[in-house]
Amino acid sequence: MTGPISPKPSPPRISLHAWMIIAVALVAAIASWDAQRESKAALSDFGREQAALARSAADALAARASLRSDARELDASDLFEAIPGVMRSTSSIPLLSLEGSGNWISPKGPLARPIDLTPPNAEAWTTVSRPEAASLGLHERTAVAGLATANVGGRTWRIAIVTSAERERDRERRAQGRLVLSVLVAAGLVLAFGGVALRNQRKELELARELAIADVQRGLDERLVRADKLATMGALAIGVAHEISTPLGVIAGRSEQLLTRLEDERSKRNVQVVIEQCERIGRVIRGLLSLARGDSPLLERVEPATVAMKAAELVAHRFVSAGVTLDTEVADDLPRIACEPRLLEQALANILLNARDACEPGSGHVDLRVEASADRVAFVVEDDGKGIEPESIARVLEPFFTTKPAGEGTGLGLSIANEIVRHTRGTLTIAPRKTSASGRAGTRASIEIPAVPRPA
């Protein structure tokens, strides 16, 4: 018999306040990223516009030079006259530089302060810092220089059209203001709805506490009936927790693999496994609740091999961690069975885990065989563990009966498996196994399910 089951501490949960903060931060991060992306795209478009203006100016210079015989003698002041006036607005400054000289000349003369207009990429434009823009007579704001070259009388002139990007930056600043406003509005809404949810939750907790106090104050007979119901519900809750332990074990194992492989295909498959196991948990819980209510079974016709393989997959990592070998053998041409596959898989997984626990860690061996006899299909699990005492065989399927040390078993695994098998109109038997080749006695568990008649 097991000792009292000590309650396990509840895992830490993120509070509603934390979720609200995370939601607001996520919205802000996405909005900020989008605003920065749009700002970079706008600046890039503006730079290409200036590059087009520079090419237009270069074409104008080349056209002017083709009309003059002394084109080679033209200096910067003559060339500036050929640049269209639209490029010399208050927000744009044309610059010229003879190829190889490295000095830039403005309409007012050589620049007192050298500037570097080498584009950092393959684009024909570059940004100009605020101090450099101010030295050219523009507003002390970021500027953009479109670049081009022109052949004038056999000499190559570099042309730059430097234009202030103050309007683009002003639009960016206004966009950032709208971003901050939208984030504040979103945060306000989240906090408002979160506050309402917390208040409702608090009211529900207070109401539940008042109902509990009222229940305690009732008569002795009613308290005894309620205690009986609570005991029943407690057993069911423990059973459900036991049933989800295997999928949660799979989730934990796959998640550990995911920590070391974040970008390859295997990691992606592991994430899919996590999702599938979460879905499985829901199906198992629904099946157990249906079983507890006594609902009519919703049977499906399935292949026995599929049930056996999926059950073996569920517990494979547990066998590996314990160093116990699991061998599976499925007979050929098995008839189908009618069952709830998820529940039957879980029942078989429970039996496999019991067999693993009975084996010696590092050297144990468990066999899973699927075979047919007459009109039934049998799932046979045999281990070479310590075996089962004769006096325990009669009680092994009782709820809360276990031979494991206190705290290591609830005594519900086999009893729940037995109820699932009965729900499927089958039988579960536990018996000692004949002495194995290793000299260990071991245990034999067999699930027999009626076979579906083959079509004539």
Image (cartoon, rainbow, N blue to C red):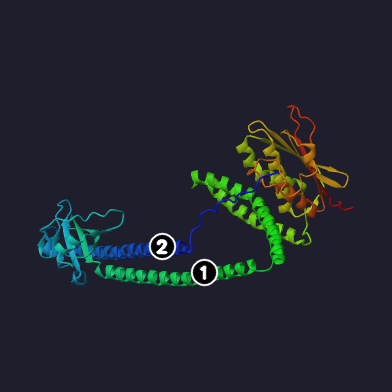
Residue 297, percent from left and from top: 78, 59
In the figure, 166 relative to 347: above or below?
below
The residue that appears at 52% across and 69% down in the rendered structure is 202
Q: Which residue is mark 1?
A: 202
Q: Which residue is mark 2?
A: 25
Residue at far front of view:
220
In the figure, 240 relative to 311: above or below?
below
101 left or right of 326? left
Disc 1 crowd, CA 10 A, few/some/many (<14, 14-19, 20+): few
The residue that appears at 61% across and 67% down in the rendered structure is 212
The residue that appears at 65% across and 54% down in the rendered structure is 280
Label 2 to label 1: alpha-carbon separation: 26 Å
Residue 242, percent from left and from top: 66, 50
Closer to us: 372 or 21: 21
Residue 351, percent from left and from top: 72, 44
SS at mark 2? helix
SS at mark 1? helix
Q: Quadrant of residue 103?
A: bottom left
Q: Let me know if residue 68 appears in the view.
A: no
Which sits earlier in the primary sequence, circle 2 or circle 1?
2
